[in-house]
Amino acid sequence: MDKFGDVVLELGPSEGNPRNSEGAFIELKDGRLLFVYSRFLGDSPEDYAYAVIAKRYSADRGNTWTDDEVIAKPEEYDAINLMSVSLLRLGNGDIGMFYGVRQGWHDLRFFLRRSADEGESWSEAVCCMPGPGYFNVNNDRVIRLQGGRLVIPASYFRMRGESKVELSSWDSRAMLFFYLSDDDGVTWRESNSFYTLPYARSGSGLDEPGVIELADGTLWAWCRTDMGYQYETFSMDQGETWSVPVPSVFTSPNSPLSMKRIPESNYLLAVWNPIPDYQTRIYERHTAGRFPLIGAVSKDEGKTWGHYFSAETDESSGYCYVAIHFVDDSVLLAYCAGNRQDGSCLRRLRVTRIRIADMLSLP
């Protein structure tokens, strides 16, 4: 498959800014687009290094972008960094901005701040995880259901030691949780189901979940694993309880999948890394096997998939943490796209524009 799309924004690492990654979009009431992402400052690009939340605007539907502005800093929380932002139009018309506040390997929770003036100012933060712990929520993951309920898919990591700063105290095997709000984000609670991946040889567990609401109201969630597939689970009661996770149709390395509904057509668009011929290909450390980056479309609520296309095919780079936003006749994909020279797939952020008609013209 040939590479699709045109790059409209590229944020590579530079001195004093070793990493740009994990963003989310929202359309403002005046037609501008707001893009918010994790911007690392200092010398280190590691997940536990200093990072702020920055924003950029586009006044021409995503073709060009302003310079960055910092809108949230970790010192506001006496924290290490802020990461993994989601943007969502809330029920009262506010913009909701969700992001993780990392205190250490023992405590990473997600908070909601609201803007009533289209991103110019933000409210005090509300914690979305009632109990303490280390939680991971990917960027561009929080959803609002047709009935108004907010759903956050989260992975939880337990401590197996007492140190709050040593990685050895942190268990990498993720558990699957969901957090719900029925009052537009004022208060939050856990759903009634949570799951682990019961395989001794799995080191990832059920990590970095996503969720989408199907046309009949069923919730469909998926998780990255190190078992060769995205695992899937379903809820028939708006996220209160969930089925036992099982392998889905999506082959995948230990890398997340993203999915959203295409407006007007009502089709589903999924973007992820499939597993290539892993018996003959050696994954380099900087990519972690996260290539190529492909997309596919389902016209029957995820039962079958077609219209496969390649967003990225360069094997010297890795691609992950995709944000999806539809604008006019196109879709904007924002994702990590670091290459061998960068040293990690997480250090470079790229935004690509793809025409929806071009995707749907494929078999």
Image (cartoon, helix red, strand yellow):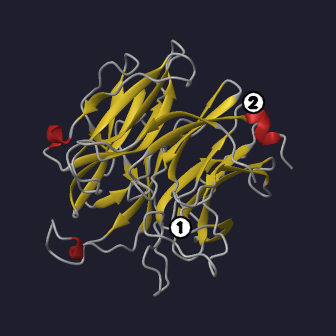
Mark 1 lies on a secondary structure that is loop
Mark sitting on residue 264:
2
- Closer to the chain start, of discs 2 and 1, is 2
Determine whether 280 is above or below 356 in the image.
Answer: below
Quadrant, the N terminus:
bottom right
**Label 2 Cα crowd, 10 Å radius (few <14 / some 14-19 / many 20+):** few
Residue 94 seen anywhere in this rendered image of the structure:
no
Is 311 displayed left or right of 242 in the figure? right
Please tell me which residue is depicted at 18% across the width and 50% down the height of the picture.
Answer: 80
Mark sitting on residue 289:
1
Q: Position of residue 161 (x, y in %)?
A: 19, 77
Is 203 displayed left or right of 221 in the figure? left
Is 247 displayed left or right of 91 in the figure? right
> Front-most of 55 and 89?
55
Q: Position of residue 102 (x, y in %)?
A: 24, 52
To which quarter of the image does residue 62 belong? top right
Please tell me which residue is depicted at 69% across the width and 47% down the height of the picture.
Answer: 3
Determine whether 96 is above or below 190 in the image.
Answer: above
Q: Residue furthest top?
A: 30
Q: Residue furthest front?
A: 341
Residue 162 seen anywhere in this rendered image of the structure:
yes
Residue at mark 2 to residue at mark 1: CA–CA distance: 34 Å
Q: What amino acid type should be assigned to the residue bearing mark 2?
A: Glu
Mark sitting on residue 220:
none
Please tell me which residue is depicted at 45% across the width and 35% down the height of the picture.
Answer: 87
Mark 2 lies on a secondary structure that is loop
